[in-house]
Image (tube, rainbow, N blue to C red):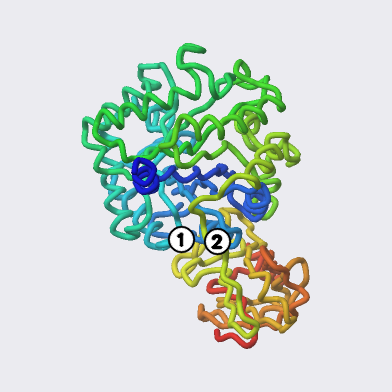
Amino acid sequence: MRFLFLLFILPLLAACRPADPPPPRVGVHTLPADRHTLALAAEGGFDAVVELFSWRQIEPTRDQWHWQLPDEVVAGAAYYGLDLVVRLDQHPAWASDVPLTLNAPPDDLADYVRFVGRVAERYRGRVLGYVIWNEPNLAIDWGGRPPDPKAYTDMLCRAYTAVKAADPDALVAAAGLAPTDHNDAEAMDERLFLRAMLEAGAGQCFDVLAAHPYGFGQPPDAPRSANNGLVMARVEDLRALLVEHGLRDRPIWATELGWTVDRQGSQGWQAVSEEQQAAYLAQTLEVAAQRWPWMTLLAVWNLPSVDGPGGERPPERLPADFLGYSLVDPEGRPRPAYYRLQALNRSRPRGDRPQPRPTLSADAAVRVPVLAADAVVHLGDSDFSRPWAPLYAARNPSVVWRGVAYVPDEALADGRPWRLSLLAMQSNVWDNYLWINGRRLEPPLPVEDFGGQWVRVTWEVPAAWLQGGPNELALTIGRTHPLLADLRFAWDDLQIKDAVLWSVNGER
């Protein structure tokens, strides 16, 4: 009888045992998430990328929105099957008198809340989570003013409401706080800052707590007492505060973590070798799985672009303090840490991850947006009032535009031709050309009058010119008539928007 009882009851007990938590997402913080870094992240086996959507880049002028780069990030993350976590900060010049060398809350918080809502509305269902601001316990990220946990809580709660109204399923993360023992006008201990936040009611205003558990030169399993408490296990203090305030169910995302190999910079005192960096990052995954089941995302700081959008931001132009933590060296070559994490990522269980892109049928219509209808690009050398947008990339003259289109691999299998169309306004010379992957499309943009009307232009694109994944598009403009050049107009001024690439049997 005892045997029969055990035979019956043991399976029931096993069925009632709580399921093991899913393995954490392993991600990387990109700088920026362009076609280069996204490909490296995917090849490295990462699940997610954390990316800054800079307010000053998206809305550099009040109510003039520049969506091209964030649109490309969202499209690229979807193509590579990467979860996307978006950080929202960096004030534009019009929102505060604080210099752009600092990160300042706006004079009118409603401006930031509106920005957050617009981003969440645009990318509804396509972003895993939004991080509201960055390291507000440092004066450098709070407009040079002393950290103010109550003021940040007000920002967080209002932003939380905006995100949930626009994208209810997206997660809202309270900003990652900088680990520090300082308590002065320049910085506030992150544990005291979080306690003050929670006492001000912040617990109702986030789904996830972001954190920045750096190693400070110590191994990830270093005890809490080591290095005057500046160790990765310090994150356990933040977890304890959540539990103390009845928030045991709130996970923590490590949106930045890592070790620097730069011995010359301001953080050289905590530098490790490249081999130690690789070993410590790999060990972090093991430590987190064993000791921190509430940490559901670990994102390494950082993965910089090998050349950036349009070749404008090579990694050597990033601060040395950033590059010391990077998974690639200043020349863009992967460090040992990248390869070590790649091997681990490919062998570990994946848990709840983005689903692979569905396979297209042979006759499926494929439409790939390149430039949205509300993403106006102005090339030329003249600033005009509306309906003209500011000059592209804030350059004068601005003579080339570049964009990226992510084409599904299987959409090119049958070799059928494609078309590309866009809306153009006031192309006035015969040598304004569009290019795809370095090949020039013919004919050039047609010459128009000066009526300021949008005209649809379409080109045939051979399938052989395209490739699965990222395809680079470019528009180059020509010089005006010499007589006009004498009147200050050296380059043609034109605008484009609503660019789309589609298969011929699809519908525009």
In what quadrant of the picture does the N terminus appear? top left
In what quadrant of the picture does the C terminus appear? bottom right
Give percent across and percent down for residue 421. Answer: 61, 79
Badge 1, how many Cα within 10 Å: few under 14, some, many 20+?
some
* Foreground residue among 48 and 388: 48
Q: Amino acid at mark 2?
A: Ala
448 lies left or right of 256: right
Q: Amino acid at mark 1?
A: Arg
Give percent across and percent down for residue 479. Answer: 71, 68
Furthest toward the left, the residue is 200
Q: Secondary structure at mark 2?
A: helix
Q: Secondary structure at mark 1?
A: loop
Query: Between disc 1 and disc 2, whose residue precedes?
Result: 2
Q: Is 7 placed above or below 469 here?
A: above
Give percent across and percent down for residue 116. Answer: 36, 52
**Residue 78, label in figure:** 2
Q: Which residue is mark 1?
A: 126
Badge 2, how many Cα within 10 Å: few under 14, some, many 20+?
some
115 lies left or right of 394: left
